[in-house]
Image: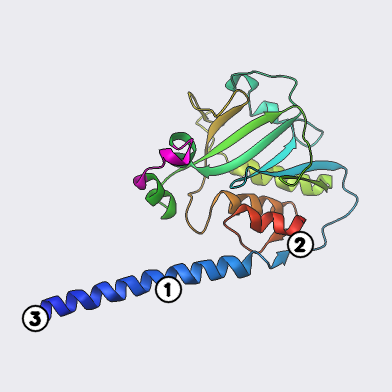
């Protein structure tokens, strides 16, 4: 075996070991950090109901469509949805990778290029918004009562996650939706292994001074603190 082949084998082995070490360290960090709480004792006596809602993978932050703090209909348009349901009472916000959102409606549609870009900070992001008339608490939907001050901070966090256009209006991504009551908008930031849709939602709870994980890339890390 000549030197070139030995060098190649050593490089391949080291590269494989580095990948294994990275995966182990990443999974260990996930397992430890999502269990560490922040804002363990939020301010009590809040009179504004917000919700965290998961589809089993992705967490949405759900807020009132309109109150004295924020009227979301000035930014989000019912007409951007197929239903155009002006009787909706709640708006759900879910930040995520634009490629996943728009071009991967089912896991079977996932392309290697989309996954690679999403994992390694190479793609842009989008905000998925959904209108609801009612919210029902269950294992996948938890209600949280927040104060007006905490809600105002949450509103600012969500607003800052949108990418405004030249006229400061939200940039609606036309022709894309999952159903009759949702729409997509351009968002700020980039998705990665270290900042996922659930990391964003966890950050939203931190901004509202509510219970949250120190860091989590997945939904169970959020709901762990609301069991």
Q: Are marks 3 and 1 in contact (CB under 8 Å)?
A: no
* Front-lying residue, 89 or 107: 107
Q: Mark 3 sits on what residue?
A: 2
**Residues in magenta, as a range:** 104-113
Residue in the image at 41% along x and 42% along y: 110
Residue in the image at 74% along x and 47% along y: 139
How many numbered discs sit on the rendered protein? Answer: 3
User: Image quadrant of residue 6?
Assistant: bottom left
Q: Position of residue 126 (x, y in %)?
A: 51, 39
- Crowding at dot 3, Cα within 10 Å, few <14 / some 14-19 / many 20+, comes out as few
Q: In terms of sequence position, does the residue under pointer 1 or pointer 2 come before the other?
A: 1
Q: Is residue 115 magenta?
A: no
Q: Position of residue 203 (x, y in %)?
A: 64, 54
Q: Mark 1 sits on what residue?
A: 21
User: Image quadrant of residue 69?
Assistant: top right
Residue in the image at 60% along x and 28% along y: 182
Furthest-left residue in this view: 2
Q: Is residue 8 above or below residue 174?
A: below
Is residue 152 shown left or right of residue 181? right
Secondary structure category for the residue under label 1 = helix
Q: Mark 2 sits on what residue?
A: 39
* Front-lying residue, 101 or 126: 101
User: Image quadrant of residue 168?
Assistant: top right
Secondary structure category for the residue under label 3 = loop
- Distance in Å between CA atoms under marks 3 and 2: 60 Å
Q: Position of residue 50 (x, y in %)?
A: 77, 42
């Amino acid at each position: 075996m000549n030197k070139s082949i030995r060098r190649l084998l050593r490089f391949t082995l080291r590269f494989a070991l580095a990948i294994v070490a990275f995966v182990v360290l990443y999974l260990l960090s996930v397992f430890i950090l999502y269990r560490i709480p922040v804002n363990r004792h939020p301010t009590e006596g809040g009179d504004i109901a917000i919700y965290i809602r998961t589809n089993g993978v992705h967490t949405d932050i759900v807020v009132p469509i309109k109150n004295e703090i924020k009227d979301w209909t000035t930014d989000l348009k019912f007409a951007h949805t197929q239903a155009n349901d002006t009787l909706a009472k709640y708006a759900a916000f879910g930040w995520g990778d634009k490629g996943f959102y728009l071009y991967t409606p089912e896991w079977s549609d996932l392309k290697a290029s989309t996954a690679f870009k999403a994992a390694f900070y190479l793609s842009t992001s989008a905000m998925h918004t959904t209108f609801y008339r009612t919210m029902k608490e269950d294992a996948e939907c938890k209600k949280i009562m927040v104060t007006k001050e905490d809600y105002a901070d949450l509103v600012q966090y969500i607003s800052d996650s949108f990418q405004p256009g030249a006229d400061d209006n939200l940039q609606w991504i036309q022709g894309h939706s999952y159903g009759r009551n949702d729409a997509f908008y351009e968002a700020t930031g980039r998705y990665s292994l270290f900042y996922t849709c659930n990391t964003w939602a966890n950050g939203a709870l931190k901004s509202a001074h509510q219970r949250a994980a120190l860091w989590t890339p997945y939904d169970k890390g959020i709901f762990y603190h609301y069991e």
